[in-house]
Amino acid sequence: MKAPADSIPMLTPEQHDAALKWLGLLHDQPSAADQARLSRWLQADPAHAEAYAQAQVIWEMSEEPAAKLAVEDSAALAALLKVMDAPAQAPQRRRSLARWSATLAMAACLVLMVGMGLGWQPQRWGDDLGADYVSAPGQVRTVTLADESQVTLDADSAIAVHFDNGERHVRLRRGAAFFQVAHTGEPFVVDGGHGETRVLGTRFEVRLQPSGAQVTVLSGRVGVKAGADLPQQLLTAGQRVSYDQARTTAPQSVDSESQLAWRQGWLNYYRTPLADVISDLSRYYPGRIVVLNDQLATKRVSGSFPSNDPRAVLAALKSVVGFQQYEALGRVIVIR
């Protein structure tokens, strides 16, 4: 017989948080003393038992995506700690930090997910630590540099600026940026994804990709090099290339106005893998969106979507592509 609704205790955020922490502990080889403390906590208040039961359901639904994201974030955390942890510091502290990182990646999946919405994102911390200009998730931001060049940052992006020795350098640390370069006579170079884009008088976008970057020219010309020892590829208006550490693709003709419409709040796609669409959309969602179906990720998508409502875009994609979707704790959307 189902219990009356008024017999179910009202739970506080603190009780939910405590239940999730207990689950994280129990998935990390708890001691007998830990198990005894949990038993006492459960018996202390009926709300504790209810919170623990709800946490178990959420854990079972979300352990797989949390583990996937934990691995990604652990690698980013390790890189961040390497930057912050000076060689002169005690080896014992470095070992302690390494153990803490491994514990987060392996044991505290759900606790990790609670914080991943806005607080727990080591990759963003590392990018922002060395950035001069940053845009938040969902924010498109235009900044004017010291030379009067304008840079429009796509949502959740970061750049570092270094003008010295007769050259203007901008490093794209995260996301994407559109450049409108002022003509000063000094070279203007955008570094990103192990390569560089050298301005020859233009308006263009550089967008980071998992293994390199993509460059799209709206007007003028740019020279793109995948590495210092590789030849430069020249692009003109309406052309795009991608590069990684080893090569640059041949220039491809594109509708650059349509491809760069994110500056006006639109995301346009033509036969684009769903994984790439979700990657773009994730920058406009104040949390994380994870695709756990590799076959689904390769499906091609075409359409024009408003960037200011990621949930509505997901609903439209779901009706066309067909996938299962659920949310964990209001911060992580999982797609299967």
Image (cartoon, helix red, strand yellow):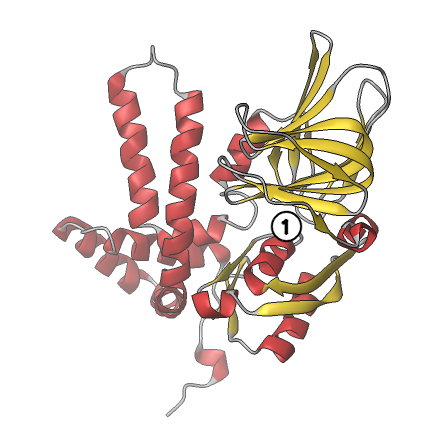
Residue 96, above or below 104 = above
The residue depicted at 68 percent of the width and 45 percent of the height is 251
The residue depicted at 73 percent of the width and 38 percent of the height is 235
Percent x, y of residue 110: 39, 56
Q: Name the residue furthest bottom.
A: 1
The residue depicted at 58 percent of the width and 64 percent of the height is 274
Q: Amino acid at mark 1?
A: Arg
Percent x, y of residue 210: 51, 45
Q: Is residue 149 visible?
A: yes
Q: Quadrant of residue 204?
A: top right
Q: Quadrant of the N terminus?
A: bottom left
Residue 2, above or below 164 = below
Q: Is residue 110 visible?
A: no
Q: Name the residue furthest top.
A: 165
Percent x, y of residue 29: 18, 51
Q: What is the total number of numbered labels drawn onto the structure image?
A: 1
| Near-viewer residue (60 or 228) | 228
Residue 213, above or below 269 = above
Is residue 160 rendered to the left or right of residue 47?
Answer: right
The residue depicted at 83 percent of the width and 18 percent of the height is 147
| Near-viewer residue (65 or 253) | 253
| Near-viewer residue (288 or 264) | 264
Q: Quadrant of residue 271?
A: bottom right
Q: Secondary structure at mark 1?
A: loop
Q: Quadrant of residue 165?
A: top right
Percent x, y of residue 101: 33, 37
Residue 126, above or below 117 = above
Quick one: label 1, few (<14), some, or many (20+) residues within 10 Å? many
Residue named by callout 1: 283
